[in-house]
């Protein structure tokens, strides 16, 4: 125990002696105040060769990323602009979720909501054959037979021997034949009531 006390005293004295080696004028008389501490910190911005002095890469300096002037006239059939403006990206997980929700609505005979979800799935994952087939089924249930025919035909075009190809062929055989656009417009004009005719 005596050794521990002597060792502690020795360490304290050695520390006091080391502190006495430097004269007091090497140390500041008082600690700096808050006003003295507020010095400007040098900027950490890195400048690269070719950078304009004083120019920032912040929101204040916008870069035009649009196509060059006259590009649409120079390349009228490129179609790039339409693809670039597509706001939906490919996301098969969201497409699958939309199909599941569409199935929920379809089972409860809410075909309009089911169709909306199946079409959303086709936006997230174009040419998804499951969403395409179920969309055609919903259209058929809603009485939109020409659109249903188009949906079934698109399904069979992608998967002629697919798991629901027989169902699609069967549904197509039940649907009326495709009506050409000119005949459809003429039929609509003939069935429209005359102007001023009394409604019964």
Image (cartoon, rainbow, N blue to C red):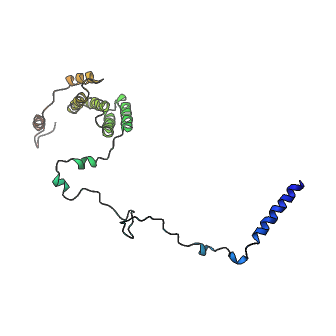
**Residue 46 at x, y = what percent?**
44, 64
Q: Is residue 176 left or right of residue 59?
A: left
- Foreground of the two, 22 or 77: 22
Q: Which residue sits at x=32%, y=61%?
A: 63
**Residue 166 at x, y = what percent?**
26, 21
- Foreground of the two, 34 or 44: 44
Quarter holding residue 90: top left
Quarter holding residue 127: top left
Q: Is residue 107 visible?
A: yes
Above or below 125: residue 46: below
**Residue 143 at x, y = what percent?**
24, 31
Q: Which residue sits at x=24%, y=56%?
A: 67
Q: Is residue 114 left or right of residue 28?
A: left
Above or below 8: residue 25: below
Quarter holding residue 125: top left
Q: Which residue sits at x=29%, y=60%?
A: 64
**Residue 30 at x, y = what percent?**
68, 76
User: How many numbered discs, if any?
Assistant: 0
Q: Is residue 29 visible?
A: no
- Foreground of the two, 125 or 107: 125
Quadrant location, the C terminus:
top left
- Foreground of the two, 140 or 127: 127
């Amino acid at each position: 125990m005596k050794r521990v006390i002597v060792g502690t005293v020795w360490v304290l004295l050695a520390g006091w002696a080391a502190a006495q080696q430097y004269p007091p004028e090497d140390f500041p008389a008082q600690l700096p105040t808050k006003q003295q501490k507020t010095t400007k910190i040098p900027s950490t911005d890195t400048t690269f060769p070719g950078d304009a002095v004083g120019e920032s890469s912040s929101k204040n300096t916008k870069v035009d990323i649009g196509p060059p002037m006259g590009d649409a006239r120079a390349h009228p059939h490129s179609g790039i602009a339409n693809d670039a403006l597509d706001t939906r990206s490919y996301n098969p997980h969201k497409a699958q979720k939309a199909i599941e929700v569409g199935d929920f609505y379809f089972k409860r005979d809410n075909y309009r909501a089911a169709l909306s979800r199946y079409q959303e799935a086709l936006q997230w994952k174009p040419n998804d054959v499951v969403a395409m087939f179920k969309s055609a089924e919903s259209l058929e249930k809603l009485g939109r037979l020409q659109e249903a025919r188009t949906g079934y035909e698109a399904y069979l075009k992608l998967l002629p021997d697919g798991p629901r190809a027989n169902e699609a062929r069967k549904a197509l055989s039940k649907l009326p034949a495709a009506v050409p656009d000119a005949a459809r417009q003429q039929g609509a004009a003939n069935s429209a009531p005359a102007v001023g005719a009394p409604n019964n």
